[in-house]
């Protein structure tokens, strides 16, 4: 069911795009596919970014509530819920959105691993332009079918920037640890995989940062971004 609903459609989209890209370039095809995915899932990404931006906005007030009612957990919870209600903030929305996005992310991960290995004809729909293989040498420099240290570092660096913006203004120690831990874990993971995964990771993280900055600017100006 997972393969039919997610893996095959995304894989066929990648093959379709690659068949129309000069030289069947996998790197360029990934850029286009990421743009398509971000557009189709814009409401979900937007909701998650809004939730994150709103949490950062009310973080000082949350810290104040924790400090004032540190010895009264019941009152602290009541004040926190009142704060959430006042700002129309659901602390569980980002978790729910993550669970919705997770199957898509897993499918994309498998698609790029398969793409680096060549065309899997068994996954193609009838009528999809068949190409014999992807061009995995991106820009004549990066072999996307193999691990690449530069692209792995790029993925880790963009993840570090994203973590910085997520934790900016927060005094929570977990945010500080996230700033250090997430880039390191990203580097450890992607440097062992075909570098097409690192390339996708970098692209989607950059789009996330841009979207986050736009939403935070709108919140700062007092305009809640709509879905």
Image (cartoon, grey):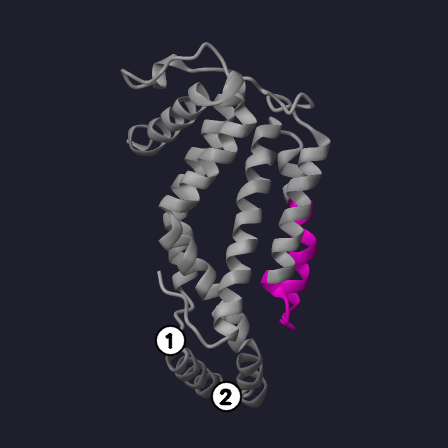
Compared with 86, 16 (above or below) is: above
Q: Which residues are magenta?
A: 166-185
Quadrant of the snapshot with the N terminus? top left
Residue 112, x across and y down, in percent: 50, 28
Residue 126, x across and y down, in percent: 27, 15
Q: Nearer the viewer, residue 140 or 175?
A: 140
Dominant SS type (magenta): helix
Residue 108: in magenta span: no
Residue 88, disc: 1
Compared with 84, 103 (above or below) is: above
Q: Nearer the viewer, residue 76 or 98?
A: 98
Compared with 125, 175 (above or below) is: below
Q: How many marks?
A: 2
Q: Quadrant of residue 71?
A: bottom right
Quadrant of the snapshot with the C terminus? bottom left
Q: Nearer the viewer, residue 145 or 39?
A: 39
Residue at 48%, 23% in the rendered image: 21
């Amino acid at each position: 069911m997972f393969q039919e609903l997610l893996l095959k459609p995304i894989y066929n989209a990648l093959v379709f795009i690659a068949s129309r890209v000069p030289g069947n370039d996998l790197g360029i095809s990934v850029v286009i596919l990421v743009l398509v995915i971000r557009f189709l899932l814009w409401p979900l990404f937007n909701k998650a970014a809004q939730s994150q931006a709103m949490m950062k906005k009310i973080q000082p007030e949350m810290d104040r509530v924790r400090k004032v009612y540190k010895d009264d957990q019941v009152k602290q919870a009541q004040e926190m819920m009142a704060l959430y209600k006042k700002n129309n903030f659901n602390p569980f929305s980002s978790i729910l959105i993550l669970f919705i996005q997770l199957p898509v992310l897993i499918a994309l991960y498998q698609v790029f691993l398969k793409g680096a290995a060549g065309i899997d004809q068994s996954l193609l729909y009838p009528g999809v332009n068949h190409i014999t293989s992807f061009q995995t040498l991106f820009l004549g420099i990066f072999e996307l079918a193999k691990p690449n240290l530069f692209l792995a570092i790029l993925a880790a660096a963009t993840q570090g920037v994203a973590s910085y913006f997520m934790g900016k203004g927060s005094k929570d120690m977990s945010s500080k640890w996230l700033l250090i831990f997430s880039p390191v874990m990203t580097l450890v993971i992607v440097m062992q995989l075909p570098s097409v995964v690192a390339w996708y990771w970098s692209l989607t993280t950059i789009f996330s940062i841009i979207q986050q900055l736009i939403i935070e600017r709108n919140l700062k100006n007092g305009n809640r971004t709509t879905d």
